[in-house]
Amino acid sequence: MRDRSKEGLWAWKQSENNNRMIALQSGEQSQESRADAIKLAYFGGSCFRITTPSGLSLMIDPWRNPPWGGWDWYLYDFPRCEVDIGLSTHAHFDHDNLHSLHASTLLDRLVGRFEFADAVISGIADKHVSDSTHGVYDWAGLTRKLTAMETVPPDNWRSFDNSILVIETAGLRILHWGDNRPNPPEAVWDALGEIDIALLPIDGSQHVLSYEQIAHVRDRLHARITVPHHYFVWNVTHRASTLLPPDEWMASQPDAHYTDAGEIVLSVDQVKSATNQALCFGEKVAFDPGAELAGKAQAAGA
């Protein structure tokens, strides 16, 4: 049997270095930077890359397939990505693939405050969803029946903790909910405050949050723009995931828009002028799924 305790991180093998971080540390900015805008890119699952005006890139919740084998959640491995900072909200395979990133800094399940260049990142500790009776499949109930894992707080196992992340840059407050429960204590809501862009887990199976819970969370955050994640993408996600597209929820929104690409530029004025807008990447991702599928097929035939 393979001894995984000796694997560890493999950053020591990476050919990249922290020169970009040194430059940003000194106040330099990329040539493509815009003081009045951010870039938001979607990589499927719950994974987003945020690029700040200075050019600092942050990738949240890169995914991987389940480590126990037997079945896959994704059609291939996570694409190769070089970023400045990698972040994970919680210790589940579809959110915690930080070790695959070519990154200078890794922030796993951050609790507290991290500040660098033109970004301030706050991690607010709370709990993962443990009641999924509202969904098409009660996966949390099945987890309790089929495993020894304790999912219900406060005595839950580590994988049912969650850190809600808030990134402040360019005068915007961007939230990544992870898979947090919909009813955190008032102290958590106070720490979150008002949010400009809320990245929320929204899919047709209501895997993490029900539609009613989504409405409650949006209302508490006063979110200007809500962006779905954690949904089925036909050339990224296996049907065995049980996830569904977010189209039903999007169709219910009075101000709904789909992006034309896997990465978009959002100006500060555009965000600040929005009111309860729904913005969805749909099947658009910021990499080439066809190339990833072809590479997997080539590797299998080698």
Image: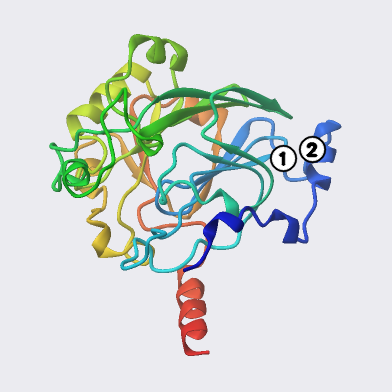
Q: Which mark is residue 29?
A: 2
- The image position of residue 184, as x and y in percent, is 32, 19
The kind of residue tagged 1 is Ser
- The image position of residue 68, as x and y in percent, is 37, 61
Looking at the image, residue 110 sits to the left or right of residue 275; the answer is right
Residue depicted at x 48% and y 65%: 77
Colouring used for the render? rainbow
Residue depicted at x 19% and y 50%: 146
User: Does residue 298 sit above or below 111 in this rendering?
Assistant: below
Looking at the image, residue 99 sits to the left or right of residue 241; the answer is right
> Residue 5 is drawn in which quadrant?
bottom right
Pointer 1 residue: 33
The kind of residue tagged 2 is Gln
Looking at the image, residue 143 sits to the left or right of residue 12; the answer is left
Looking at the image, residue 26 sits to the left or right of residue 64; the answer is right
Residues at circles 2 and 1 in contact by the CB criterion of under 8 Å: yes
Element at badge 1? Answer: loop
